[in-house]
Amino acid sequence: MKRSVGLAAFTLFLFSSLVFSQAPEPAAGQRGQRGQRGQRGQQQPTQPAAPTPHFKDGSVNLGAAPGEKGFWNVGTTSVYGRGGLPGNLTVDQIPFQPWARALFQYRQATSTKDDPHARCVPDGGIHFWQLTNGVEIIQQPELNRIIMIAGHNHVWKVVHMEPGRVHPSPDVITYGYLGDAIGRWEGETLVIDTVGFNEKFWFHRGGLPHTSEMHLIERITRVDHDTLKYEATLDDPGAYTKPWSGGSLIHWQTTNYDGSPGGEIDEYYCMDNEKDSQHFASK
């Protein structure tokens, strides 16, 4: 699937009769940051954070330390715009291919009504880090893998950590929502190299397009107990004229999503007892 698939997708969205109104993505600077309100009124910590936790072997613990509960409040994650890491591109600086810019502008102009997320489609790419209910990271070095669980619809992805592992060739790889993810450690930073994405989802909230050519490199660093530094480099010649990068800080949450005590991801399944699909085309 190449650029023609992206053009076909644009045509499909343009004439789609299925309409679902969803607010455009707010600028990162308008969403919760440390010392401000996060998900569902969660007050982010203002006191100095404890040091980065480590396992007994010295490796970084990306999850809860023994005796703790918590997860990563990912609702503010973005790789462009205000409020992210210094150097994030503005929208006008993103190196879109012409068709991709037109599709992005259409999605923004129509309040992202066609986002497959609203139809319970799994969210891959960077969108995985932008879901309500947060993300939990489970490290299993004895199995050479890291499991990441997104609370929204309980989507999970496996990061394969076997030394020397390589991606399947393009002619045999299975193109999926989460892709084929291979991880490695560079010092205290987890680097995740992923290919093999399909085009059935939006890889970033707000409607940034992608194609099956997308090659995503993510760098995750726990800079202290309460903070992940998330960086992503997107190389997708089908949708962009050159690779580009951006990132955000992600904060640790010790309450439940609704602000009650607990620090655990709520059970949530998008289609459980769903009764409102008849209203998707009401606007």
Image (spheres, rainbow, N blue to C red):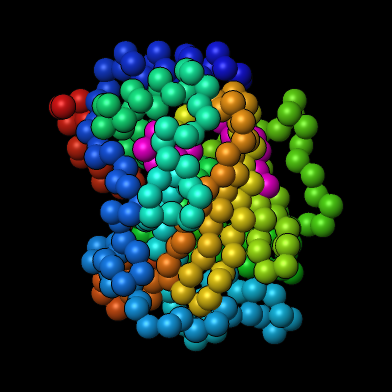
Of all residues, the one furthest to the right in this rendering is 164
Residue 200 seen from this side: no
For the point 55% across and 25% down, which residue is it? 239
Q: Position of residue 180 (x, y in %)?
A: 66, 43
Residue 222 seen from this side: yes
Q: What secondary structure do most residues of the magenta stretch adopt?
A: loop
Q: In the image, 44: left or right of 221? A: left
Q: Quadrant of the N terminus?
A: top right
Which contiguous range is marked in magenta? 193-207
Report the front residue among 275 and 235. 235
For the point 26% across and 26% down, which residue is it? 110
Q: Quadrant of the C terminus?
A: top left
180, above or below 256, in the image: above
Q: Judge whether residue 104 is colored magenta.
A: no
Q: Position of residue 98 (x, y in %)?
A: 48, 18
Count of numbered marks: 0
Q: Judge whether residue 205 is colored magenta.
A: yes
For the point 27% across and 26% down, which residue is it? 109
89, above or below 184, in the image: above
202, above or below 87, in the image: above
Report the front residue among 220 and 48. 48
For the point 55% across and 82% down, which residue is it? 51
Q: In the image, 167: left or right of 108? A: right
User: Quadrant of residue 80 in the image?
Assistant: top left
